[in-house]
Amino acid sequence: MGFGGFKLLLFIWALFFFCSSPSFSQFTPADKYSIDCGSPTNTTVGGRVFLSDNLASSYLSTPQNVLVEASANSIPQSEYSQLYKTARIFTQPSTYTFQISQSGRHWIRLYFFPFSSSNYDLTTAVFSVSTRDHALLSEFRASGDSVKEYSVNVTGGDLEITFTPSGGSFAFLNGLEVASVPDPLIADDATSVTPPTNFRGLSDRALETLARVNMGGPVVTSRNDSLGRTWEADRGFLKNPNLATNKSNIAAVRYADGEATPDDAPRTVYGTAARMASETDPKSNFNVTWEFPVDRGFRYLVRLHFCDIVSERANQLYFNVYIDDSSVLSDFDLSTKVQGFLATAYYADFVTQSIQNDHIRISIGPSGIRDVDPNAILNGAEIMKMSNPDGSLSGKDVPVSSSKKKKSVGVIVGVVVGLIAVLLLGLVLFFVYRRRKQERINQSKMWTPLSTNGLSQTMGSKCSNGTTISAGSNFNYRCPFAAIQEATNNFDESWVIGIGGFGKVYKGVLSDGTKVAVKRGNPKSQQGLAEFQTEIEMLSQFRHRHLVSLIGYCDEKSEMILIYEYMENGTLKSHLYGSGFPSMSWKQRLEICIGSARGLHYLHTGYSKAVIHRDVKSANILLDENLMAKVADFGLSKTGPEIDQTHVSTAVKGSFGYLDPEYFRRQHLTEKSDVYSFGVVLFEVLCARPVIDPSLPREMVNLAEWAMKWQKKGQLEQIIDVTLKGKIRPDSLRKFGETAEKCLADVGVDRPSMGDVLWNLEYVLQLQEAVLQNDPDENSTNVIGELSPQIHDFNHADANTGTAQFEMSSGDDISGVSMSKVFSQLVMGVAMRVNHGAPSLCNGLARTTLVVFEIIGARVRPFWSPWCNMANVYSCEPWCAMALAFGWSSVDAPRLVGIGLIGMFTVVTHMLVL
């Protein structure tokens, strides 16, 4: 081929490439307003012209014009320094009104820098900012230079932004921008993080940008972004900067049809990346993690930007991406998303559940695919707070701006002409409304019984005595919605104490001053009527000191509201990590575990049919003012299998990290599924870390697997909470680890019952408190090495068995435990002591009496339990309580014989009565 032919071929190839590459025209906003508040002249920032305050005065309605100017040496050096030189003061509510020519999403950017002038100290200003539909800021106090960026969907012909000073204070503003947003920038749907389903409805939400970050590169100023955005550098957000290296190849970036555009992120963002620092180690196995501060109680839209500028060929890079504890992209191959082209811009959107921490973590790490070099990349990230269902981005009640005060002459004339008629009609309607309202109030103060067969579908008959809601009321009653509104200050957002899958939990105060927790179901929640009904049916049957008590419920107006006793100290999880509570001692943690085990043991054995909780986790263990544990949240609970069945076949539900693997694989639910979850909680209590933490190295991500690894090595002390170092007796720690290990057996039949777990935790506490002294066999393997001993086979008891003194802390402490294997093992312990401390005749009589005592007790328990519950003794069988009352630690054989005889007499008496 000649030189001319070569040039022709080159020209054809270039023409083909040019024609096949998409072209993107720069977006021109239909609406664009920029104001330099307080400035006498126009100001140019990032290529955008901000109008002087006097030229923009037509947009503002304010009762007073106050403009202030900062001293030259007080202005911070930043991209927006020019805007920070002046400010406008609002001493009373004031509103900017902008005409909107094209409906859709619009940016609102508010620029703040508090400085001191001769008459005003802007650092003391406290105020709120709102639009007609959304609360943007509440009780805001600027502490430094900041830009608040919002994206709101404007459907009317104008946009109002109102500044409202708090009582005795004032508001201020340095700069303001309003501009149209490209329609495709924010789609209506995204991928929900947990569970990984499709989320719809973003177009109805206002968004606030909390972070916009350029990974692996420098700051990208608004001048270099087509939409005037600023992208921060990522180094300040990296948890461990040494684990990441930067990569840059801006020239290689390409935009493809149907994928990201320059409006989504500029080339300077897609052309830089943070990658794993794994070049020198082909076996690298760690995650690179960024942590971003956020506000609790909101959902977040997380947008992640990717562009493979590190690979040499397609299908070479596979990696995982995590948001907090959830995997959002697994074995992610970017080239499959962009038709195999390298360096092609791409982004993915994710919506989180309501965040309960004060941060969001984004992590990238290597894939588990073999023969793939460990590497992962991230080019950019945006985190946007989503408005709540009330339209608020502030978390508090903020008055939204009123509509325009200017009325047309025609409307005013019409009002004047019809004034007399309106007044007359208004008086009639007022009296009718007042009468009906009074009738509703009178009715709402009445309670209606809860249907014993589930939720009643109507209000039913009213109680004749007009009982009002109070802590002492019977829990089997429906509560009027009006009374709940009063108790929660009309569901004041500042009274929210938690947010879960079902909805928000509010603190409430009843009419008698008693504090309660009010859980209000969210209509959009994935947990609906079935869980609501299950919780009422379950808790209406149970009264136990280690189960959270249900006080009432409400199903008026399609509401799903549950009222519980108030637990002063919140969740066990919040005390273990992440919430700033002081560290708990080992004894406190053990007592909490013991209390929780008692509650679960009661669920499994307290009735003729076991109840399986199905969502045992540290977040569902609540603590009262004395740190006494109570199990909560029974929305997923199921009754256990029939007598002739071994399991319940049901769809898998629960919490990631706590799920029984056998239940997950086979959908076979048993009481042992709760035991597995409780075993995870035990390690969580010991190590004080989340059960799943993707920011950690791979082998440490799953707490259960990581802890079991060290337990099998016999080195569990290496991973315990640092605040417990040197404070746990070795025997206590060893027995605790063995108990947790048994709970986490892969097959359910190999796990202990909850009663056995309870027994062993009591023993762990005794070891910690050094109750077992001078015992030649004080070894966790010898004393209670097996979690399921042959507790009934007294005839073959070894006469040489070492003495073991098992003391319960008090009668009250055991009052929540139903008689089962736990009591059987207590009987066994007494029988063992009798072998060593009593004459043979008394020995034999005591042992025989106690065995009969246990057998008869087990036979009549199903008939006695209802009587126990009615007497509010928490299902504690009378013979068990009697034995404790006589002094369990005594080794006096005649006293044991007396206990046994009185116990038998009690049983016979009750059988005759029943």
Image (cartoon, helix red, strand yellow):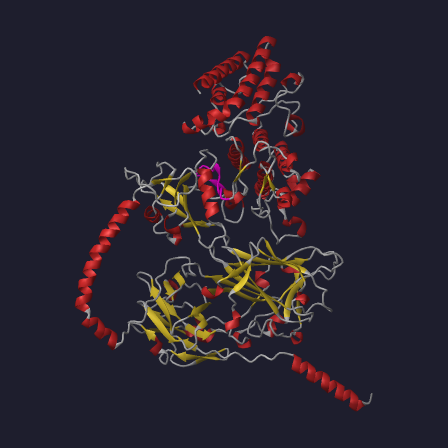
The residue at 48%/16% (across/down) is 908
* Towards the viewer: 704 or 212: 704
Say left or right for 8 vs 120: right
In the depicted structure, whether residue 350 falls above or below residue 658: below
Q: Is residue 118 visible?
A: no
The image position of residue 296, as x and y in percent, is 47, 55
The image position of residue 231, as x and y in percent, is 55, 69
Magenta stretch: helix, strand or loop mostly: loop
The residue at 23%/53% (across/down) is 434
Region rendered in magenta: 621-635
Report how many numbered discs are placed on residues in the image: 0
Q: Can residue 323 be seen in this view?
A: yes
Which residue lies most toward the bottom here? 4
The image position of residue 860, as x and y in percent, is 50, 22
Which residue lies most toward the right here? 1
Residue 624 in the magenta stretch? The answer is: yes
Q: In which quarter of the image is residue 197?
A: bottom right
Q: In which quarter of the image is residue 396?
A: bottom left
Say left or right for 468 vs 526: left
The image position of residue 226, as x and y in percent, is 53, 76
- Quarter occupied by the C terminus: top left
Residue 286 in the magenta stretch? The answer is: no
- Quarter occupied by the N terminus: bottom right
